[in-house]
Amino acid sequence: MNEQQHTTPQKAFAEFLGTLLLLCTVIGSGIMAERLAGGNVAMALLGNTLATVFILYVLIETLGGISGAHFNPLVSLVVLRHTSKPLLAYYVIAQSLGAMAGAWLAHAMFDLPIFQLSSHIRTGTGQWIAEGVATAGLIFFILRSSQTRASASALVASYIGAAYWFTASTSFANPAAVLGRMMTDSFSGIAPQSALGFVGAQIAGAALGVILNQLLIKNIQIGRD
């Protein structure tokens, strides 16, 4: 996720476009999967998962060299916290706008009302723990990818695909995704009253991911002394 030299507007636009396409895929594939699955929730989730994995890989590969391909305010916070606070602000705004636009575009393609709010309640201790775990893993693997030769696009796409299935929350792991999913009353949605718990768990998870990575770095350094 190392970006080359581009202007701030180019970087912000890449974050807007990437987050738009990510949420459009998550929501659009959820709508399509639900229509085709005939009430089989497992099949709907599988279709939603595959589409998300594929688009994450493509977006990170194609936009990573411009903006770093964060598409997530918490990823931007972790990556940019010591470098550029103004750029962080631009990224968060672009990601938030992109998430909403992605939901609206998905609705337009499926001839649904453009502007919606979700009624899908997602709450409870298990859901919050799941979001913490999902976000911790996402941040951890992104940080590890920058210290190894592993492909960030493959790591992130694979992890999110797995986390769709092993977490009770189906791994939002992204406050921008929560915002976009609030805007759809479809398979992928989350009710506004459930959003705060998810975002709080994601923030805690992001902090845990940073700590886990730091513990590994310290262990490596101690071993070399």
Image: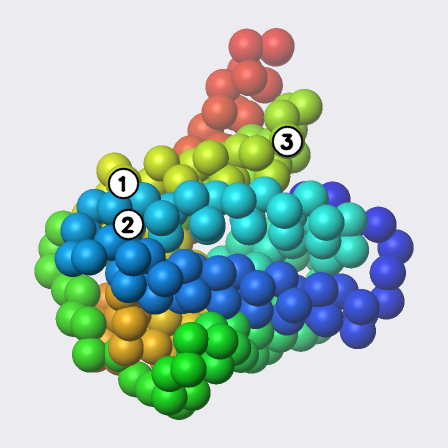
Q: Which residue is mark 2?
A: 45
Residue 99 appears in view:
no
Q: The C terminus appears in which quarter of the rendering?
A: top right
Hey, what amino acid is under mark 2? Leu
Residue occupying the point 78% across, 55% down: 66
**Mark closer to the chain start, 3 or 1:** 3
Residue occupying the point 72% across, 53% down: 63
Image position, residue 133 (x, y; %):
30, 43
Residue 17 appears in view:
yes
Left or right: where 212 falls relative to 220: left
Q: Which mark is residue 94?
A: none
Residue 146's quadrant in the figure? top right
Q: Which residue is mark 3?
A: 151
Hey, what amino acid is under mark 1? Trp
Label 1 to label 2: alpha-carbon separation = 8 Å
> Element at badge 1?
helix
> Element at badge 2?
helix
Q: Is residue 87 above or below residue 217?
A: below
Hey, what amino acid is under mark 3? Ser
Q: The N terminus appears in which quarter of the rendering?
A: top right
Label 3 to label 2: alpha-carbon separation = 26 Å
Q: Which residue is mark 1?
A: 165
Residue occupying the point 52% across, 60% down: 22
Image position, residue 195 (x, y; %):
28, 72
Label 3 to label 1: alpha-carbon separation = 22 Å
Front position in the image: 113 or 215:
113
Labelled pair 1, 2 in contact (Cβ < 8 Å)? yes
Left or right: where 19 falls relative to 67: left
Q: Nearer the viewer, mark 1 or mark 2?
A: 2
